């Protein structure tokens, strides 16, 4: 599909929380945290997701005209109703722009990018702003040391437009699969109709992030490898043709597996989890936006966006930037 | 866009709650409820949204092959993570089908239908199952008599496929707008990062449905009229060419306004709010599925799907069934 990421933006909360700051809260050593999660520090936001996303969104627009669609692609909403996209728009000072949310937890951004590409390809919209803003630290369960040490806060946005015939930019390939047999491996069981906040049987743990790290890693590694091979086979591309692998920053181990198991060179795989933690849906666009801003990702580069999310889902997109 | 609704399904919870049953809970007379909300009875589900949606989804598939994408298009999720689509898939006994959610409260279905049409038009997917399941009665605030008397439970699903060249079925037009200046008019403030369930400042009211009915009606009526005129102008169609207007069943008054203010005949406007209440995102597909099942909506009919949702958003789609 002939699309182009024509702008990108970031919000990295200024407050840094080092592993030293969280170790006593989860009753684990700093070394344990580094070994288990691969996270050395993460950001903790003091503003809510609407403001975080709006800052990233404005940067992606870069003083250009307003978008004609705003898609929120985050893991956890600001509130149940209305959806977060409305609040981004409010913070950005717009009125009347259609907006809605696409949600599949950590894969929300990759899925929204593909969906937005379809909307552009079908001439439905022309200038789509996709924003991911997650504040996972609010939902940390300190009785679950592994997931509590993983989560960080951040936001990123991209502006998507049609690419012209003399531009190479495009979405080459997209694939996604969801296996509900893994639906209980990553959960926030509360916040909806199942364990309603007003239900006296809803526990504190139901309202916090819960994750079976080892079980996910086992399934995720296999499924990610499968979709990686499928993507290479279907596109006829070799690993060395991919300029940058931009994985969901699930954990240090998960990112490293793209090298040890996935067969990519260390130089190809972009890593931000050690400094920013797992920022749920914002991890992929944050990693992308940072690499665009510091000049590593250049126009014409071939990008592989890949990862797993609660569901359990796996997805992979190939994009010519 | 050349798409066709090739299947539809419904789940109407068997338990009926009449206005007589709820009047004492909200301290209002039966007459007051009928006058304010237009709801004479509603269904109250004893199963959760995943099971409700799966029943409707299976009916829409009608023993055919599995879909290649499942989209959840509901107002309120089963839980925060993972998204509801995973749980539909689990209940339907599938594994490996990509699935995610599209959310813009009461307009989730209309928006998902348009988005899915784009995905088909761009050859991304071929057989998309869209499911809306809402259980608004769980979030009723009995201290808000108007909204508490409005909400009902239900689920519906449609199967979307490409239409062939010798078929007339298509999506002719779609428009949507969101005005964040109205974002506080319909809310469930809890359930996310703003008023987290574990935040001691989160109140019971924050976790329940809250609505400023008269203020919404005033804005909604104006904005719906605007998009109605826009749709007729852009497509060159007249009101009499529309076979069926299928509005979001916001309230008795809101549905009636398509006749009194919108200029349609009573016979054109499909009404289900009096017997089923406002079923949030499920209202539009439930009303559509009922009219397909009882034979009113026939192949080739021109349908207008229209309504407002929290955001505040308004949307309108024209579909040749």
Image (cartoon, coloured by chain):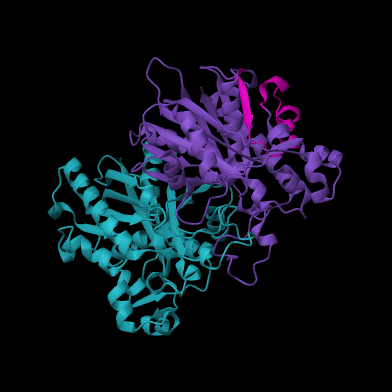
Chain colours: A cyan, B purple
Judge whether B219 appears above or below A94 on screen.
above
- Counting from the top left corner in percent of width and height, residue A277 is at 36, 70
Q: Nearer the viewer, residue B44 or A254?
A: B44
Task: Look at 41% across and 53% down and name the residue there.
Answer: A183
Q: How many marks?
A: 0
Residue B319 part of the magenta segment? no
Q: Position of residue B161 (x, y in %)?
A: 40, 28
Relative height, residue A251 to residue A223 (above, below):
below
Residue at 54% x, 47% y: name it. A97
Q: Is residue B231 above or below residue A191?
A: above
Q: Nearer the viewer, residue B122 or A320?
A: B122
Q: Quadrant of residue B98?
A: top left
* B242, above or below B149, in the image: above
Residue A61 spot, x, y in % from top left: 43, 56
Regarding residue A288, the answer to whether it shows in the image is: no
Residue at 45%, 78% in the rendered image: A15
Query: In the image, B237: left or right of A182?
Result: right
Tell me if residue B253 is in the magenta stretch: yes
Q: In the image, A294: left or right of A192?
A: left
Question: Residue B106's spot in the image, x, y percent?
Answer: 60, 43
Residue range of the region highlighted in magenta in the rendering: B241-270
Q: Nearer the viewer, residue A60 or B261?
A: B261
Residue pictured at 53% horizontal, 67% vertical: A48
Would residue B200 be visible to someone looking at this image?
Answer: yes
Task: Find residue A39 and report its image quarter.
Answer: bottom left
Quarter of the rendering occupied by the N terminus of chain A: top left
Q: Residue furthest top?
A: B166
């Amino acid at each position: 599909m002939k699309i182009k990421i024509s702008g990108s933006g970031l919000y990295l909360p200024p407050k840094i929380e080092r592993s030293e700051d969280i170790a006593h809260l989860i009753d684990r050593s700093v070394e344990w945290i580094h070994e288990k999660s691969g996270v050395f520090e993460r950001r903790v936001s003091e503003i809510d997701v609407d403001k975080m996303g709006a800052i990233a969104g404005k940067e992606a627009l870069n003083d250009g005209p307003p978008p004609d669609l705003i898609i929120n692609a985050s893991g956890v909403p600001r509130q149940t109703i209305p959806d977060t996209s409305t609040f981004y728009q409010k913070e950005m000072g717009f009125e009347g722009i259609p907006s809605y949310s696409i949600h599949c937890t950590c894969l929300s951004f990759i899925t929204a990018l593909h969906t937005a590409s379809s909307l552009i390809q079908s001439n439905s919209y022309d200038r789509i702003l996709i924003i991911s803003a997650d504040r996972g630290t609010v939902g940390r369960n300190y009785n679950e040391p592994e997931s509590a040490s993983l989560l960080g806060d951040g936001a990123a946005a991209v502006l998507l437009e049609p690419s012209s015939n003399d531009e190479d930019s495009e979405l080459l390939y997209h694939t996604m699969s969801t296996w509900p047999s893994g639906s209980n491996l990553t959960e926030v069981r509360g916040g909806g109709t199942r364990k309603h906040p007003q239900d006296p049987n809803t526990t504190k743990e139901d309202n916090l992030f819960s994750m079976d790290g080892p079980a996910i890693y086992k399934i995720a590694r296999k499924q990610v490898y499968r979709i990686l091979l499928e993507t290479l086979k279907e596109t006829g591309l070799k690993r060395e043709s991919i300029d940058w692998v931009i994985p969901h920053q699930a954990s240090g181990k998960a990112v490293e597996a793209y090298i040890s198991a996935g067969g990519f060179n260390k130089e190809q795989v972009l890593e931000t989890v050690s400094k920013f933690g797992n920022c749920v849906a914002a991890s992929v666009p944050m990693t992308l936006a940072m690499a665009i801003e510091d000049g590593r990702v250049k126009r014409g580069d071939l990008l592989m966006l890949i990862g797993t999310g609660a569901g359990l889902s796996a997805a992979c997109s190939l994009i010519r930037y």
